[in-house]
Image (cartoon, rainbow, N blue to C red):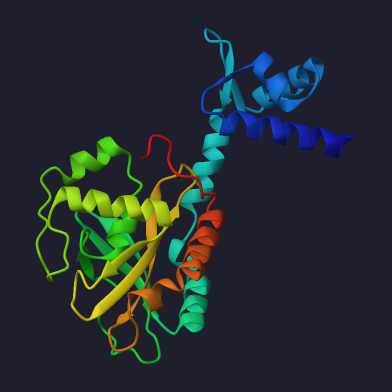
């Protein structure tokens, strides 16, 4: 009986947390398939524990302060690099290509950690390397899911400097490329930063659906081409989805494209 009540409470908590808008008591009863008395009893417990709050004027239910405190404490305690290491090393082993993880810093994607392939010439994707967002796969993966108003504000005065003949040099061209990122689930860099480098990257989402990092898979023209690298896209996205899952993420931020 106790286990059943816990399960029902978690189910109700999930309904409230995943709703696109706050739910009323009647909506909770309908969507949970629980009786009114059961929903009333569980809501009382959850509100006592500050896991749920009731908006008195709107007469609807939202997650409570304690629920958000738990999320913040858990998320703030994660070492993203440590969580990503196993997946990145396995990805490098399975594909034979270089892997790295990057985060956004201003107008740049910054490499946090990298693992070189056995045949790599080394040194290119070193920790601390700063790459302009528009020329690298990691940069594209980091910004492709930004809410449109935030994206437009960030790139309104951005300089799309040419690095190679393949570099995207206009905002419209960049927007079109990012639409492909969202459609595929990963970004590409087809010799846009260096003439001799191909790359693909996939985003890592946090618990509120924001992209907080990207894992990059890359190699040189001597070792692969774009189609050969994209053959490993499913392996790459599996790794980033697992890292996202470990930090409670996985869903795209509401209000995104």
Identify which residue is drawn at 32% across, 63% down.
Answer: 138
Of all residues shown, which one is farthest toward the top? 57
Of all residues shown, which one is farthest toward the front? 227
Looking at the picture, tell me which residue is in the foreground, 40 or 237.
237
Image height check: is 42 above or below 94? above
Of all residues shown, which one is farthest toward the bottom? 119
| Left or right placement of residue 77 versus residue 199 in this view | right
Residue 61 quadrant: top right
Residue 25 quadrant: top right
How far across and down, in percent of the image, does residue 154 sit? 20, 44
How far across and down, in percent of the image, does residue 70 sit? 56, 41
Identify which residue is drawn at 29% across, 83% down.
Answer: 220
| Left or right placement of residue 214 versus residue 198 in this view | right
**Quarter containing the N terminus:** top right
How far across and down, in percent of the image, does residue 115 sit? 39, 80
Looking at the picture, tell me which residue is in the foreground, 192 or 27.
192
């Amino acid at each position: 009986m106790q286990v059943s009540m816990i399960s029902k409470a978690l189910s109700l908590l999930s309904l409230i947390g995943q709703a696109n808008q706050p739910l009323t008591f009647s909506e909770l009863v309908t969507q949970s398939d629980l009786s009114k008395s059961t929903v009333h009893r569980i809501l009382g417990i959850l509100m006592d524990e500050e896991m749920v709050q009731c908006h008195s004027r709107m007469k609807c239910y939202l997650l409570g302060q304690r629920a958000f405190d738990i999320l913040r404490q858990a998320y703030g305690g994660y070492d993203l690099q440590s969580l990503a290491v196993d997946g990145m090393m396995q990805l490098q082993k399975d594909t034979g290509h270089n892997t790295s993880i990057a985060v956004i810093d201003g107008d740049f994607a910054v490499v946090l950690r990298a693992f070189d392939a056995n045949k790599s010439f080394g040194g290119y994707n070193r920790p601390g390397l700063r790459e302009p967002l528009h020329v690298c796969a990691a940069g594209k993966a980091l910004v492709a899911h930004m809410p449109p108003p935030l994206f437009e504000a960030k790139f309104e005065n951005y300089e799309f400097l040419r690095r190679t003949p393949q570099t995207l040099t206009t905002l419209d061209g960049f927007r079109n490329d990012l639409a492909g990122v969202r459609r595929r689930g990963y970004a590409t860099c087809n010799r846009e930063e260096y003439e001799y480098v191909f790359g693909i990257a996939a985003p890592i989402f946090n618990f509120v659906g924001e992209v907080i990092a990207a894992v990059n898979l890359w190699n040189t023209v001597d070792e692969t081409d774009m189609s050969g690298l994209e053959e490993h896209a499913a392996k790459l996205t599996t790794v980033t989805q697992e890292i996202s899952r470990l930090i409670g993420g996985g869903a795209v931020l509401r209000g995104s494209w």
